[in-house]
Amino acid sequence: MDPAALKESWAYVAKNGDDVPLFFYSHLFLSHPEVRSMFPVSMSAQRDKLVTALGTVVSNVDQFDKVAPVLGQLGSDHRRFRVSPDQYNAVGGSLLATLKHFLGDQWTDELAGDWAAAYGVIAKTMVQGAEESAKTTPSWWDAEVVSVERRTLDVAVIQMRPEQLLPYRPGQSVAVEVPQRPRLWRYYSPANVSRDDGTIELHVQIVDGGQVSSAIVKELQPGNTVRLSAPIGTALTLEDPTRDLLMVAGGTGLAPMKAVIEEVDRYWRDTGRGPRVHLFHGARMPWNLYDDEAMRRMAQRSWFTYDAAVSDDSTYPGQRGTVGQVAAARGGWRGYRAMVCGSRAMIDATVPQLVAAGIPHDDIRYEDFGEGGYRPRSDTAKDG
């Protein structure tokens, strides 16, 4: 395979913008109508997700050793869609047809062979990942909604109880499908450590244009059954239970931080030692500090410090500015590991601010499970 040719050809095709996914999905659904039911009724949110991800991953097959674990996890995660090997073949065929259409005379037999070989490697890795996970875990977990608490205008805290125990580490995320929006899965982080009754707490904020977040906050009811995927992500999990932590959370990015804080609390109670933890939680308006009371109670622990920041209310009596600005300005983070969670814009703004404040980039952890799927650290609100 010629990695340079793969990258160049994909870059050329990608310049055609929305015409690329339009051709891809048209070809896929016309040639294999049986796969249409796997996708949402409305494709407006789906748009270029699949074809863009495929093109990007396959054209970077020369970095396979780095992406192989992620591909295996993606294959496992896609079990919730009941994807079969034949359907991987259908998607691959439509991808090649799309490339041929937009490349025209540049689509040579050699390039076709390179793309086919690269896609074959990717698909095989994903199928094997799915097969391996099927030995130990279900395709998804059904969970009953126990309660829906509307905390603010646009934030709800959901309590749900899976029918089977869903094992996860604090800081990981699970994809969620609600009955009000079938076949639309979005990632959310449990906001708690494992409980004796198995319940899981999710924090959900309405995202502008977000079909799933709006349905959860406005329409989800106790007694509804939702589906949860296997957990994914490690960047926000606790690696060293003795290393001091700086946590910077925007909006419902607080959820995974809260779970890790509970984990640290258990560690302190079990061992009598542990890390110092400093949490900064930011919101645009003060009423969006939806878990402020619980965090202030937690701050009674000697090892935990909590600061709130509000960016858009000039009358707020506390700290004003974006949460990244406030955390960076505080300083004194030498030796700390930083965790950042929030919207993509918040992450993209906060990470450079922390680096400028003296935290090495390698000591900053973040993840993104938004509209474009899983983005490894380098990998919530994690919705649409």
Image (cartoon, grey):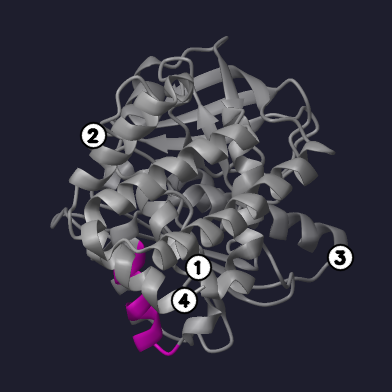
- Residue holding disc 1: 377
Residue shown at 59% from the left, 49% from the top = 74
The answer to whether one can see residue 377 in this image is yes
Residue extending furthest toward the front: 109
Q: Nearer the viewer, mark 2 or mark 3?
A: 2
Asked whether the viewer can see residue 342, the reply is no
Q: What kind of element bears circle 4?
A: loop
Bin the neighbour count of mark 3 within 10 Å (Cα to Cα): few under 14, some 14-19, many 20 and up.
few
What amino acid does circle 4 point to? Asp
Q: Label 4 neighbourhood size at 10 Å, few (<14), some (14-19), many (20+)?
A: some
Q: Quadrant of residue 15?
A: bottom left
Task: Give left or right: position of 351 versus 66.
Answer: left
**How far separated are the C-alphas under marks 4 and 2?**
40 Å
- Between 193 and 6, the residue placed more toward the observer is 6
**Which disc, if any, is residue 2?**
4
Cβ atoms under marks 4 and 1 closer than 8 Å: no
x, y percent for residue 362: 53, 82
Q: Residue at x 35, y 64 (%)?
A: 108
Query: Which residue is labeled 3 in the image?
Result: 271
Q: For marks 3 and 4, give the one nearer the viewer.
A: 4
> In the figure, 202 relative to 146: above or below?
below
Which residue is label 2 attached to?
209
Q: Which residues are magenta?
A: 347-358
Q: Tell me if label 3 and label 1 are in contact, CB under 8 Å.
A: no
> N-terminal of the two: label 3 or label 1?
3
